[in-house]
Image: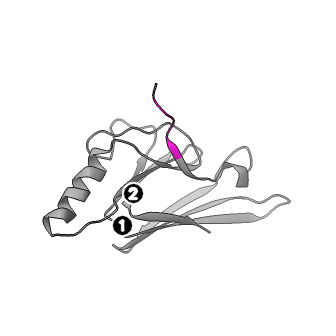
């Protein structure tokens, strides 16, 4: 029996039923941020910011789409509006091996996010993620 994917942060309880209005992804090579904008209860806009530290890989594409934007295979349940930690990720393993060649030990977690209202999928390999 396959265990469910680990959800690191679930933003659905923060958002209205129709989901997000906008998803912006930015990276400076060491950190990445995903800013999610959505309607606030009672009117106006609200944002939630996901900050990824010690980033190795960032990729964003349309979802659904014709092909995966993350090389190799991985296991992740489809959950919209959440940060999911992918299991058995070839991408994560390749980054761990890359850093090991330099004598470094790094956490290279493969995070996947599906944003169905914005039709985006985001893959980030990083050491950690925080929600603010």
The disc, 1 or 2, on the residue closer to the chain's N-terminal end is 1
Residues drawn in magenta: 2-6
- Decide if residue 54 is in sight here: yes
Q: Nearer the viewer, residue 30 or 121?
A: 30
Q: CA distance from mark 1 to mark 2?
A: 7 Å
Residue tagged by mark 2? 124
Is 4 contained in the magenta span?
A: yes
Quarter of the image for residue 102 reads: bottom left
Q: Please tell me the numbered disc located at residue 55.
A: 1
Q: Identify the residue at image location x=44%, y=39%.
A: 76
Query: In front: 118, or 36?
Result: 36
Q: Residue 113 appears at what percent x and percent y?
A: 49, 49
Q: Which residue lies most toward the left here?
A: 101
In the displayed structure, would residue 61 be above or below residue 49?
Answer: above
**Viewer-proximal residue among 64 and 74:** 74
Q: Examine the rendered structure and indicate whether residue 74 appears above or below residue 44.
A: above
Q: Is residue 44 magenta?
A: no
Q: Can I make out residue 15 in this image?
A: no
What percent of the width, then of the height, locates residue 127?
39, 64
Main SS, magenta residues? loop
- Left or right? Give the position of 55 relative to 102: right
């Amino acid at each position: 029996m396959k265990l469910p994917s680990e959800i690191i942060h679930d933003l659905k309880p923060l958002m209205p039923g129709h989901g997000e209005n906008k998803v912006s992804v930015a990276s400076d090579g060491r950190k990445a941020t995903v800013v999610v904008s959505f309607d606030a209860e009672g009117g106006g806009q609200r944002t939630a910011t996901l900050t990824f530290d010690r980033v190795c890989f960032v990729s964003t594409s349309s979802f659904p789409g014709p092909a995966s934007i993350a090389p190799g295979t991985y296991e992740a349940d489809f959950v919209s509006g959440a940060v999911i930690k992918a299991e058995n990720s070839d991408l994560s393993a390749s980054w761990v091996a890359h850093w090991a060649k330099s004598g470094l030990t790094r956490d290279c977690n493969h995070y996947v996010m599906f944003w169905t209202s914005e039709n985006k999928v985001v893959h980030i390999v990083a050491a950690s993620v925080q929600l603010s």
